[in-house]
Amino acid sequence: DQQVKQNSPSLSVQEGRISILNCDYTNSMFDYFLWYKKYPAEGPTFLISISSIKDKNEDGRFTVFLNKSAKHLSLHIVPSQPGDSAVYFCAASGAGTASKLTFGTGTRLQVTL
Amino acid sequence: EPEVTQTPSHQVTQMGQEVILRCVPISNHLYFYWYRQILGQKVEFLVSFYNNEISEKSEIFDDQFSVERPDGSNFTLKIRSTKLEDSAMYFCASSPRRTGTEAFFGQGTRLTVV
């Protein structure tokens, strides 16, 4: 049951460059999408979100793009910094009884000097 | 900044024993969740809780699992008879609204069943 997929398990980017993390989903009932960042032995930390009525949301160095017709979203980090090295999870929720999140499998980002 | 806190950070238990994982959600939040992450796998939803009852649960959340909010601040997950495959990181989360908002996660409890 892979309703949310992150096809790249890892990504390596040089400091200062753009990191682009991708996510695909299959459930058209999802209406809210989020990106979380996770360090080892810690809980997921919320980064940025986007509602299905928008196609872009920006917060500082982080921008999330949503392409509803393709059921695809991406997270852009510009410029990438070494502290951004972590596992990034895409998550989605729908208009259910409570906003449970369906997570992707994660992409490990490594930002090199 | 308000945060979700979980105790203990690490619990080792023998197979068949009962464990209780504890969480203190953010005080003005109304929706509470348990998720788990088996090593190397994705974070999976277990259960959501609102107004002192379960709102939704996954197929993982079978009869050996239960949740409770015993005193208005703590939110607990009980596993009645642990199995080896219950070994995972368990995350508590809370959110202020039902939809359209992020959930805030605790740092997790690593449960090891031996």
Image (spheres, grey):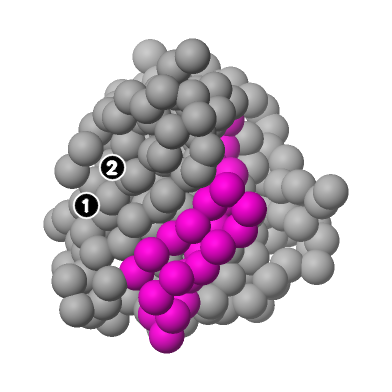
Residue B20 seen by the camera: no
| Residue annotated with mark 1 | A5
Q: Residue at x 84, y 48 (%)?
A: B1
Q: Position of residue B30 (x, y in %)?
A: 69, 72
Q: Which chain is disc 2 placed on?
A: A
Whether residue A70 sits left or right of residue B5 in the image: it is left
Residue A10 at x, y = what percent? Answer: 28, 29
Disc 2 and disc 1 on one polypeptide chain: yes
Q: Secondary structure at mark 1?
A: strand
What type is the residue that disc 2 sits on?
Thr
Q: Is residue A47 magenta?
A: yes
Residue B114 lies, with reference to residue A5, above or below; the image says above
Q: Nearer the viewer, residue A96 or A70?
A: A70
Q: Residue at x 64, y 42 (%)?
A: B106
In percent of width and height, residue B113 lies at 40, 21
Magenta run includes residue A97: no
Rendered residue at 28%/50% (across/down): A22
Packing grade of label 1 (10 A; few <14, some 14-19, many >=20) is: many
Is residue A104 toward the left or the right of residue A14 in the image?
left
Q: Which quadrant: the C terminus of chain B?
A: top left
- Label 2 vs 1, first from the N-terminus: 1
In front here: A85 or B26? A85
Q: Where does label 2 land, which residue?
A: A105
Q: Position of residue A55 (x, y in %)?
A: 39, 75
Numbered range of the magenta stretch: A41-66
Label 2 with label 1: CB-CB less than 8 Å: yes
Name the one closer to the observer, A33 or B104.
A33
